[in-house]
Amino acid sequence: MPSLRQSSTRTMLTQFLLTLLLLHTQIHRITAAEDFYKLLGITRKATQKEIKKAYRSKSLEFHPDKNKNEGAAEKFAEIAYAYEVLTDEEKKNIYDRHGEEGLKQHEQRQGQGGGHGGFDDIFSHFGFGGGFPGGGGGRQQREQSTPNINIPLRVSLKQLYLGDTIEVEYVRQTLCVNWQECMKANQECQGPGVKVRMQQIAPGFVQQVQQRDERCVARGKMWSSNCRVCPDGQTQSEKIDLTIDLQKGMYPGEPITFDGVADEKPGMNPGDLNFVITQEKHEYYHRDGDHLYVTMEIPLVDALTGFKHEFEHLDGHKFIVNVDGVTECDHVMRVSGKGMPRRGGRGGFGDLFITFDVDFPETLTVEQKKGIRKILDGRGSDEL
């Protein structure tokens, strides 16, 4: 049985570690660099062009060769680092979700090939092998993503033949700028939307009960409701302009993906935004894979004697098809290279298949019947 002295020592050690944690938090708040967006004088919605423009302006203002004021060199270095982070897609995503501390941990993992870092290392020196509760010392969880968004993109067959660039405006949910200030510690939170609590089922027996709790935003972190810095909640609406590159020959059902552009949520990676191609019906042409199909009605005289016909393709160019001899009803003619552009680096075009539908006259006069019989069977009989 542990002695009273051992228990007292353990209590003092725990109090010391908690004091150290609070001290670390205060030091971090004092020494942490100014918010990168505020540092450059931009908003979280700033485009890469706006970020570069703001960086040029700020870097000129605080360049050590031009600004001799005390602290200008340090400010210039902070501006350069902020620009480096916000123009790197991976670093920017990490900073937006986890702040500068998360970015430092990411860089530390890259530099050291993994490891706990931070307070997990401090507590491990005192024999707490599992790390501080809610820290990274336990089983590592795979970071979740918000659901992918699929949006139908209605395009014409002509657009799929020629290719096109489509500008769209999309509204998504992005994290409140100061969302990290609205989180509080809660060891029952085991991940986004997951809360685990201990429930006694009998004297000396307990079980873990997992519940859904949207207030849990990360392991050991819970959203603080009615947070003043985020009065509208965890997220806010943001309009973004997207340019869709519709390539020649793309297929119906094929997605055009914008990685990480779906809704944001604390503790989760944003999912992908997929524009799924939906092909509109064409008046004449029908598509199957890389080939085009069209049905053409021809009069009986053309079916018997031959003909030529001018077609207009999807892009407006015209070509002539010559048919010699007799054309049977529902005969299919193949025109090489007049289909859709081929995808996948194969180059060239598919083929066009023309189905001829012979239009027979509804009635014939007696003289017409005699003439046709005379020509076709050579009997010249007046009997019909």
Image: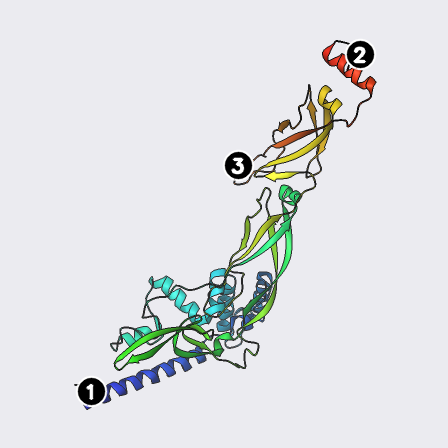
Residue that carries the numbered disc 3 in the rendered image: 346
Residue that carries the numbered disc 2 in the rendered image: 382
Q: Is residue 120 left or right of residue 360?
A: left
**CA gap, disc 2 and disc 3:** 62 Å
Depicted 273 relative to depicted 229: above or below: above
Residue that carries the numbered disc 1 in the rendered image: 6
- Helix, strand or loop under label 1: helix
Q: Position of residue 19 (x, y in %)?
A: 34, 85
Q: Quadrant of the C terminus?
A: top right
- Helix, strand or loop under label 3: loop
Q: Is residue 288 left or right of residue 380?
A: left
Q: Residues within 10 Å of mark 1 (few under 14, many from 20)?
A: few
Q: Are marks 2 and 1 in contact (CB under 8 Å)?
A: no
- Mark closer to the observer (2, 3): 2
Residue in view at x 57 percent, y 62 percent: 52
Question: Residue 274 falls in which quadrant of the image?
Answer: bottom right
- Looking at this view, is 259 or 150 the one in front? 150
Of callouts 2 and 1, the N-terminal one: 1
Of callouts 3 and 1, the N-terminal one: 1
- Looking at this view, is 120 or 299 the one in front? 299
Depicted 108 relative to depicted 9: above or below: above
